[in-house]
Image (spheres, rainbow, N blue to C red):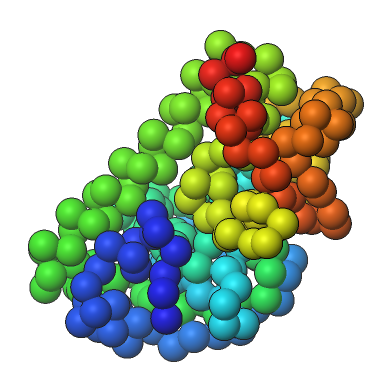
Amino acid sequence: MLWPKGTLMAAFDQQAKADFLALGEPQRFEAGEVLLRQGDPRSDRVYLLRSVRPGTSACAKVTANLGTGVETLLSIRVSGDLVGEMGVLRGAERSATVTLCTPTLAFRISANTFLGFLGRNPHLGAALAAMIADRLEWSNQRRLDFAAFDVTVRLARVIGELARRHGIETAAGLELGVSLSQQELGRLIGARDAAVSKSMRALKESGVLRTGYRQLIITDPDQLRALQHGN
């Protein structure tokens, strides 16, 4: 299968992909199930995500509770992504919760098996390091956006970034490629529901977006790119 661009599996060659998949047995999980939970001291496994249905992508939310009852959406993971690797590499408790948004095949790989694979294939560590660096850059960019831009620009920027990473070309336009609610988009940019609703309405009325239930299609990518720079 073709793995989405930007994921760990997309960076591996064919043999490495086959070898990595052979490390774990796939288990089917349904939407809403939790793979990893924040605060769990047992960093004993990682999961590789894969879609149940050919031609579609798995989708998982990475969230963290701030200790005040507020849940923050940190990022999105899709088919070909690895989750749980930071706890294993650091030997620390889980720092976030991973919840599936879609039915997913998750290859469960024990920590020892995962670390042994990296030890036998040190050249593949570069792909893992690049993946971790990319995730750090994503997080840093969201923080910079929060400090520099209003809600509409932050929303345009995160939609554009998600579409760049996961977008699917359709006859109607560029579909976002991940299934997120308006509230979840708001959590990604640190905005309240009312402010996100107002900005989404403005983007739709200006012809930049079309939306359906947990679906978003970019109909005017040029205007979206202009908005990302505050124009």
Give x and y (percent) for residue 205: 86, 31
Q: Quick check: 57 above or below 14? A: above
Q: Quick check: 21 above or below 41? A: below
Give x and y (percent) for residue 226: 58, 23
Q: Which residue is drawn at 56% across and 29% down?
A: 225
The count of marks equals 0
154 sits to left or right of 210: left
Give x and y (percent) for residue 215: 76, 55
113 sits to left or right of 211: left
Q: Quick check: 214 above or below 47? A: above
Q: Quick check: 10 above or below 220? A: below
126 sits to left or right of 156: left
Toward which corner of the image does residue 223 lie, by quadrant? top right
Q: Which residue is drawn at 58% across and 60% down?
A: 168
Can residue 158 be seen here? The reply is no
Q: Which residue is drawn at 35% across and 82% down?
A: 21
- Quadrant containing the C terminus in the rendered view: top right
Query: Which residue is most to the top?
Result: 148
Depth check: 71 or 19 in front?
A: 19
- Quadrant containing the N terminus in the rendered view: bottom left
Can residue 172 be seen here? The reply is yes
Q: Which residue is drawn at 75% across and 41% down?
A: 209
203 sits to left or right of 54: right
Toward which corner of the image does residue 40 lie, by quadrant? bottom right
Give x and y (percent) for residue 204: 82, 36
